[in-house]
Image: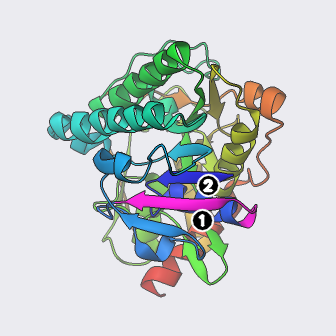
């Protein structure tokens, strides 16, 4: 197929783009490089340095695209709280521009990079696709809004689409000579923050909350390897049916506590660093784990790299490839 990937120079978008090229698809990428990196782009793609708001410049009726995979978005929760308008503009208005272009071009398929962080509950059972959606911050609210927009578009046309709600994307891959992993500024995700501490780029690490109702008192989260996430996109692309909209939760289905992640980083890197303990952060649930049975049944998807040590090892290899030892 001929496929357009928005945000294809980013972390997950870059990994998916590499897998699409390896699968024999013709790939065109647009990315404004505000958070993406040219090094993440696969060979043999056409690249446009362009805002998603101008996607209609590329996604034209004459271009002949068979589908779009939409990753272009801002993702930092704290920034979304401090500057929600930026997130309305980038994530919602950018997606509206994309949907207008999709409709004008008659593009039949759309895959959307969504998030499991929009769900609410006590975490006593894994979150499936029927869990209550109640976004706790503007970032998650934008993703939930775009999910609704896409569902409406499918109901009004022959567009077939799927929203893939990730839990905690993690790990890294090597594609040819290219290492693809997490790089955020500032960094806000647990594993890369711990790796920065292990590498001496941070003086210490602060563990927030040690009195949760979990076996070791720290939060439990579901970490899914980015290569497994990428594979789900290719499976969903094949499963799309005209006029239908589906939601799939993507996670390993079992969680790891913050303390387990800390201990694994120390073990994998062979390095120790100071750890401080702080109070719970407002809004952090004790447990957040995905139920991915629908993706398994409908798509035949199953995580191939669920082990935390493998995830951390791959992330550490990427970190050293960028920053050295």
Residue closer to the observer: 123 or 53: 53
Question: Quick check: is 25 in the magenta stretch?
Answer: yes
Residue 120 seen in the current view: no
Among numbered discs 2 and 1, the one appearing first in the sequence? 1
Residue in the foreground of this view, choosing between 199 and 46: 46
Q: Which numbered tag is attached to residue 263?
A: none
Give how far apart the Cα atoms at labels 2 and 1 are.
6 Å
Q: Is residue 287 magenta?
A: no
Q: Which class describes the residues within 10 Å of circle 2: few (<14), some (14-19), or many (20+)? A: many
Q: Residues at badges 2 and 1 in contact (C-beta under 8 Å)? A: yes
- Which x, y percent locates residue 173? 64, 68
Q: Is residue 134 above or below residue 26?
A: above
Tell me the magenta residue range.
Answer: 22-31
Location of residue 284 in the rendering, given as x and y in whole percent from the top left corner: 39, 31
Q: Which residue is mark 2?
A: 226
Q: Quadrant of residue 281?
A: top left
Please tell me which residue is depicted at 54% across the width and 30% down the height of the picture. 288
Residue beneath disc 1: 172
Is residue 59 at least partly visible in the picture?
Answer: yes
- Mark 2, secondary structure of its residue: helix
In the rendering, at what x and y percent does residue 22 appear? 73, 66
Q: Quadrant of residue 243?
A: top right
Residue at 28%, 60% in the rendered image: 186
């Amino acid at each position: 197929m001929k496929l357009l990937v928005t945000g294809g120079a980013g972390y997950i978008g870059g990994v998916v783009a590499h897998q699409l090229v390896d699968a024999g698809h013709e790939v065109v990428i647009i990315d404004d490089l505000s958070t993406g990196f040219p090094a993440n782009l696969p060979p043999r793609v056409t690249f446009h340095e362009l805002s998603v708001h101008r996607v209609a410049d590329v996604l034209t009726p004459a271009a002949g695209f068979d589908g779009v995979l939409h990753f272009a978005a801002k993702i930092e929760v704290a920034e979304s709280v401090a500057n929600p308008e930026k997130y309305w503009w980038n994530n919602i208005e950018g997606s509206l521009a994309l949907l207008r272009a999709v409709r004008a071009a008659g593009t039949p398929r759309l895959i959307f990079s969504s998030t499991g962080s929009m769900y609410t509950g006590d975490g006593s059972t894994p979150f499936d696709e029927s869990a209550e959606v109640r976004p706790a911050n503007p970032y998650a609210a934008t993703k939930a809004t775009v999910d609704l927009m896409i569902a409406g578009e499918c109901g009004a046309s022959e567009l077939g689409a799927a929203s893939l709600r990730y839990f905690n994307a993690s790990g890294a891959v090597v594609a040819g000579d290219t290492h693809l992993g997490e790089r955020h500024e500032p960094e806000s995700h647990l594993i890369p923050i711990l790796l920065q501490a292990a590498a001496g780029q941070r003086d210490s690490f602060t563990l927030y909350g040690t009195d949760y109702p979990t076996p070791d008192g720290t939060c439990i989260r579901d970490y899914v390897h980015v290569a497994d996430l990428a594979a789900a996109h290719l499976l969903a692309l094949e499963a799309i049916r005209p006029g239908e909209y589906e939601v799939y939760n993507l996670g390993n289905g079992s969680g790891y506590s913050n303390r387990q992640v800390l201990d694994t980083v120390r073990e994998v890197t062979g390095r120790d660093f100071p750890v401080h303990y702080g109070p719970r952060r407002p809004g952090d649930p004790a447990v957040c784990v995905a139920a991915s049975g629908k993706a398994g049944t409908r798509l035949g998807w199953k995580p191939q790299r669920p082990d935390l040590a493998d995830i951390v090892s791959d992330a550490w290899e990427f970190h050293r490839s960028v920053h050295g030892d």
